[in-house]
Image: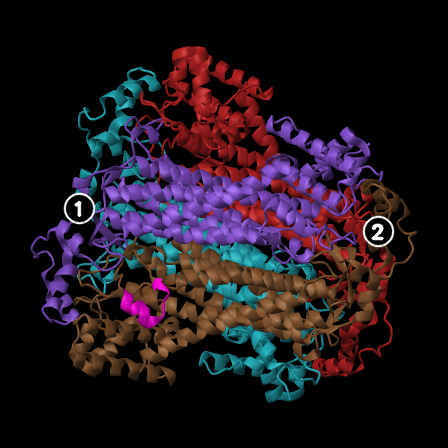
Chain colours: A brown, B purple, C cyan, D red
Amino acid sequence: MTNKLWNKGHIFDKEIEKFTVGEDYLLDYKLIKYDLYGSIAHTMMLLKINILNKTEYAKLKKGLKNILQLDKKKKFKIALEDEDVHTAVENFLVGKIGIAGKKIHTGRSRNDQVSLDLKLYTKDALLEIETAVLNLCEEMIAFAGKYENTPMPGYTHMQKAMPSSIGLWMCSFIESLLDDLELVKVAYEQNDQNPLGSAAGYGTSIELDREFTTELLGFKKVQNNVLYVQNSRGKIELSVLSALNQVMQTIGKLSTDLLLFTMSEFDYFSLPEELCTGSSIMPQKKNCDCLELLKAKSAMIFGYLMQVNSIISNLPSGYSRNFQLIKKPLFEGIEMALESIDITALVVKNLVVYEDKLASSCTNEIFAAEKAYEFVKKGIPFREAYKNVAEKIGKMEDSDVNKTILSMKTIGNTGNLGLNKLAEKIKKEKKLVLYQDNCFKKKIKNLLK
Amino acid sequence: MTNKLWNKGHIFDKEIEKFTVGEDYLLDYKLIKYDLYGSIAHTMMLLKINILNKTEYAKLKKGLKNILQLDKKKKFKIALEDEDVHTAVENFLVGKIGIAGKKIHTGRSRNDQVSLDLKLYTKDALLEIETAVLNLCEEMIAFAGKYENTPMPGYTHMQKAMPSSIGLWMCSFIESLLDDLELVKVAYEQNDQNPLGSAAGYGTSIELDREFTTELLGFKKVQNNVLYVQNSRGKIELSVLSALNQVMQTIGKLSTDLLLFTMSEFDYFSLPEELCTGSSIMPQKKNCDCLELLKAKSAMIFGYLMQVNSIISNLPSGYSRNFQLIKKPLFEGIEMALESIDITALVVKNLVVYEDKLASSCTNEIFAAEKAYEFVKKGIPFREAYKNVAEKIGKMEDSDVNKTILSMKTIGNTGNLGLNKLAEKIKKEKKLVLYQDNCFKKKIKNLLK
Amino acid sequence: MTNKLWNKGHIFDKEIEKFTVGEDYLLDYKLIKYDLYGSIAHTMMLLKINILNKTEYAKLKKGLKNILQLDKKKKFKIALEDEDVHTAVENFLVGKIGIAGKKIHTGRSRNDQVSLDLKLYTKDALLEIETAVLNLCEEMIAFAGKYENTPMPGYTHMQKAMPSSIGLWMCSFIESLLDDLELVKVAYEQNDQNPLGSAAGYGTSIELDREFTTELLGFKKVQNNVLYVQNSRGKIELSVLSALNQVMQTIGKLSTDLLLFTMSEFDYFSLPEELCTGSSIMPQKKNCDCLELLKAKSAMIFGYLMQVNSIISNLPSGYSRNFQLIKKPLFEGIEMALESIDITALVVKNLVVYEDKLASSCTNEIFAAEKAYEFVKKGIPFREAYKNVAEKIGKMEDSDVNKTILSMKTIGNTGNLGLNKLAEKIKKEKKLVLYQDNCFKKKIKNLLK
Amino acid sequence: MTNKLWNKGHIFDKEIEKFTVGEDYLLDYKLIKYDLYGSIAHTMMLLKINILNKTEYAKLKKGLKNILQLDKKKKFKIALEDEDVHTAVENFLVGKIGIAGKKIHTGRSRNDQVSLDLKLYTKDALLEIETAVLNLCEEMIAFAGKYENTPMPGYTHMQKAMPSSIGLWMCSFIESLLDDLELVKVAYEQNDQNPLGSAAGYGTSIELDREFTTELLGFKKVQNNVLYVQNSRGKIELSVLSALNQVMQTIGKLSTDLLLFTMSEFDYFSLPEELCTGSSIMPQKKNCDCLELLKAKSAMIFGYLMQVNSIISNLPSGYSRNFQLIKKPLFEGIEMALESIDITALVVKNLVVYEDKLASSCTNEIFAAEKAYEFVKKGIPFREAYKNVAEKIGKMEDSDVNKTILSMKTIGNTGNLGLNKLAEKIKKEKKLVLYQDNCFKKKIKNLLK
């Protein structure tokens, strides 16, 4: 006897089985509930088009809900020999309810099942990501509000350049995240298409009601072309990981700034002891390991993106087993991003600010451009004003940094950051995510009735 | 004497000059006109806020339009010693119109200038890309319409799997491109923000009217936070290259299919001789080099994406000279994508189809799943039907492939492709791009009045 | 109470602990035995330089060997709170043997410990990789010998080009692997340096005898500069993964060829049923999933390489916590490569050859270049001979493919493959690996006496 | 009339010509001389095996030397219509010397020609790279010698950690470069194989004397298997770029350190004004742009490596046009690395050291581990000593940093750097490179006699 759906009686080489299944039977634990949601919807549709009768339908639904209960208690097992969650579920059903179980695969293939599971998993995950990004924005805006007009040197080329403020600095990350969020939202849109009914990429002659399952599962639309369902494998994951990579780039930049500004040579900020680690050999050390790891994780994410891109590169049309390896970088990328966003929020929330040090670091020379502008306001051409000031560097009068940063009133500058608008934008986005999340949850709830 | 805006009299090492300028003075030829548009808008704004008087303004505008004329005739030169287009323009103006030229840099930095130039360049380029993608879609839909119901074996795992059609196959690429287009559109949105007025990333105390230049240059909005203007360097380019990478992935898949299906072992399609090359040693060869290069170019694009990502990774806030190296992968990526999309349209337009060979390749065994469904329609559970058919492979009756593909009526399958809807979608998208393009052109025209 | 070596009494945030430890405490199970080897050598050295007395030494050695026994039975546990194997070991020793346990960290840091553990792990792994590569070569040479003169069309541009042989084709992979092996050997050399004694990258004032531990652990030399020990983190892993990537490129090419040549349109080769999988929906399918996964895994390896490269890019000198994330791509890359090499050997061993199909596919036109050479031998300039033949394509007489491939006697061509030389080379390399492996094992055995 | 070697009379689409030729006809200027060396060797061999008579040989050699002269004066042109250097040369010869020109392509293909050209180009380039790396090492060792015992804080986790020295710091880069050099040398070895005589990857029936051309061109050996010659395309380039990437990683780390340590907050080092640039808006700025660009270029190199890897991934055996796109990343990677190594040497040579600032930054707390070791020397277990010291941080007596760094006598630490050994190693390596370079030059000289 065999667990394989496709087995026709021959012996399957054990080494090849281990190699082809790989970590799939373990990774698929993350997909169990989504696989069951999909199977319930598929079953309801098979009833509607009369492939199943009511008794069969009832048995199947009961069986599927049974597995859902088991999974909640972490008691549903996928064996290596099962290969994947889809097979484990079908085998369980056949074992429990007999003949009706053998009907559940009608009109579908594991190819469209895994595609469906991944889309539902990703939907859930992206809603979580969006929520986490917006929570991070909220921590940031609270911080920016608190230190809106605290002076801080602005750097270019890793050298002090101009007078600036914590408000400007922190808000730059908020605006970055809000732009990144747009990319997450597009990935969400691309993912929000129902693949079910495409079977192995070439449909079936059974007239499946794809709009019905789309409605049941809460997708925005049917993913139309049945071959494109397979050909989009990896591409949608690429959109997701590209968006996460951008979020991580933003986080990586903040971490880079903080690793610099918490050095004793700067001492602009610190992390409280409970967020720091020490050294096994140097008693005095207090290290911001979490910031270093945020940077390293941003490097990892791009690697996942790259893996997905390479896996799908130059594959011909139609399902390829190569797709199987996409799961792991997708799962790990999503989890790593989510965890990193949350840790960043924790960091921002706990960041200690040394206002005196920041102010005293706004040394004389960084007002040079402003000095040149004073000449400009008197009618001297900028390039000449620049040269005048250049000759007097080191001999300039001191400037009042607090006054300077307040006086910079151009849109988006220290004296005109637009904090309120940002706060409103964040609020609006949160509302939207919450709405989408509720819709999805309601659909699932109805499905399980 | 020196060309450098920042020179204060010392000698600049020649090797370092060559190293730091690199290819920049050559790459910047692509930016001249955009730099001039930006300078005209900036000049108009300086007039509005009374930094320039009318005479100075008139002189500057004349000088800038003069350079625009020179550039059209390819006569405006950027010397290595100039470092970049911005310096070349300021030097030209100072030489031609004297003191007014020295005022043009008021309230801006080369940092926001290059950011502006790149955004205008990218805007233009993305409109071209979108148009090219939609033209390719049109070639594809004409092709799909012509061969909508031509049978073709569907493959999975690089093995014949199911009966299918050219219509289904070609439409899968159209749907892929339309999804890719959404990513191009988001990149367009992210790029459509005016950086001007952010100066070196920390603004100036001069109250620049950023909304006025935004209006003049036709941007959708001000890129608000002046530091984020710098911090977004590379990130927007990443969005652009990610979108192009997705387009190239779609093209790469089509090329992979075609390289396979034009092999003499398949003989499903061929390219006409005028699109093929030969061998210097084998007289019989007729090679589809253009398809091979499309695949290779899709590999190159991801490399550009990766370069941009690595360049910006873990940089602290504010301008870094590292950004300079982003230009080349951006330019090369955009040009390579544009050229590849056009060549793909040429390939689709000229593709020769061998309908007989395609039909005769729909051999008996690929109807096995359909045979199983015939049992299912008689009430036999799918898994049993599957096993029955599996035992009879090789002994099945022949099927009528034309009938089969027409009978597959599920949404998105061979008998129900939705060609009309696709055609409408393409039309709608084209209208939108044309509208955006016209708006942009009108703004530029007004600017040059 | 706390498990941390560095704790000075404050509370450590639970989320940060989870984030910073990450998967490290799990990954470190792979390092336990190497950590113990290192600790034993370190302990012997501390005795030699009189930091430990004989009693302390005996206790420590007993404790360490105790852990080694536990680990063999999978009973030594590393808790998340321990952070890593080094801490778990020290805590165990302190618990078991008291004060002597508190001395074991003298003169070292977890920074040089993890570096040591990874070097020993990698040494072992590379010897396994080299052995596996050479086993694969042996399978290939057996195959190449058996089918040395079996005709096979040679392809260029994915089109039939010239008459060729299985011997030539298979030997091309052997020569590729032998070149790849040179890269593995260099990585082995780079890895074969003892980091112990470098402490946290800045040594200690205690005069450690680094040459003694180098001798004990069987390293080729001391990794001299104590800072370079830290700065080489990731770089040696890059060498390893670059070499593995090259091996996987060779395997990827073989898999690509086989996926093509096992298509029914070619039917040159097949895999026996026990190495193939089927479809859950199409009863007729017999898929070479293992070949598809070999290709996909070759894509994954480059991703790991890329992750390591990105993680270490632009880090300043000295240990960074970023390094921690290098472990996972290193471990996964090595395991994936090893498994893939073994599966490839299994594939080659079981490959079914259809000699008739291969011979009949050497169709007339692929002899065109040879026809031209017949003219050349009569004194006609090649370019004219080429043109003559080009005009007669389709009208050429049939050629004897068996005769043709035997007649190609130039070095490295079908009639002169040099199989014996290859076989000798493989034998010599195997001897070398075996020798190195024995030396290493002997050192470890002595250590545990 | 047509320039193409393979043209049989039909018209070639202009767009496809432009697309397929791409930048090749421009890039090939770098290959002209190598193509001519190869053609001369090939011609000599054709004379030896009696395909050419002495008159034809003399004419061809004269023609080829003629082109070499033209190329020296930059007067030999490759037209887009020629496609590549090989065709341009053959067309020139046929035009100049008639019928003998039509014989030169006997027994070879553009496939093995380009492979040969690239191998000769790469050989030359790697000798240059090795020389440049060793020159950089010499600058570094001079610097390390001068400041061998200058104190400098050692950092871990971007925090001051331990007392250290400039000698240790700078020598860490030398040891890194010497390890990198081993990778360059392996790439050199892999490249040092003669591909000539493999024709299009399947040889010819003409018995070419491959050992003779190997001898003439100074290769170490014949690249044996004629198919492997094609299959190694990209793989050898990968080895080259991997080695260069490692060199650039070392340079990137030095640049990262210097960008940090030249910040005004550190002020450990500076670059003289003639190596720095300024800002167009901020009169006071003095930026180390060259260091920023070194980092960015190290990011670019990995992109080139990645492009080559992606281009060749999953190509079937035999020549593919995809290979054409390998040239550009190879050329650009080599040139970028060479230039970066030279600039780094210039930076090291000109680096200004602020010894007082370095010494005064060795603040009290970084001696904590050493304080613990003082207890250890008195017999207190390390872990207890660590805890004792931890409690007294801030209250420790001052230490003498100069004494401390001299007292660290363990191999590879500040008091025992092994500068002499390093110097000897560099000298030995330089001798070897010089020897190889002379051998190669001699071979070429003989060829041109």
Disc 1 residue crowd, few under 14, some 14–19, many 20+, Cα 10 Å: some
Amino acid, disc 2: Ala
Secondary-structure class at tag 1 = loop
Q: Is residue B5 visible?
A: yes
- Number of numbered discs overlaid on the protein picture: 2
Task: Where is residue D107? Give x, y as percent.
Answer: 36, 25
Asked if the magenta segment contains residue D327, the reply would be: no
Secondary structure mostly taken by the magenta-highlighted segment of the chain: helix
Q: Is label 2 or label 1 in front?
A: 2
Say whether residue C135 is visible. Answer: no
Q: In this view, does D187 lie above or below C95?
A: above
Residue D446, above or below A329: above
Q: Is residue C204 left or right of residue A441?
A: right
Which chain does the numbered disc 2 sit on?
Answer: A
Mark number for residue D387?
Answer: none
Look at label 1 and name its amino acid. Answer: Ser
Q: In which quarter of the image is residue D347?
A: top right
Please state the extent of the stretch shown in magenta in the rendering. A211-221
Is residue B311 shown above or below D13?
Answer: below
The CA distance from mark 2 to mark 1 is: 77 Å
- Disc 2 to disc 1: CB gap under 8 Å: no
- From the top left corner, tell me how far across and down residue A428 is, in percent: 55, 69
Q: Residue A330: horizontal and vertical position, in percent?
A: 44, 64
In-front residue for pair A245/D158: A245
Residue A217 in the magenta stretch? The answer is yes
Query: What numbered label is drawn on residue B361?
Result: 1
Q: Looking at the image, which residue is at 49% across and 15% down?
A: D63
Residue that mark 2 sits on: A368
Q: In which quarter of the image is residue C47?
A: bottom right
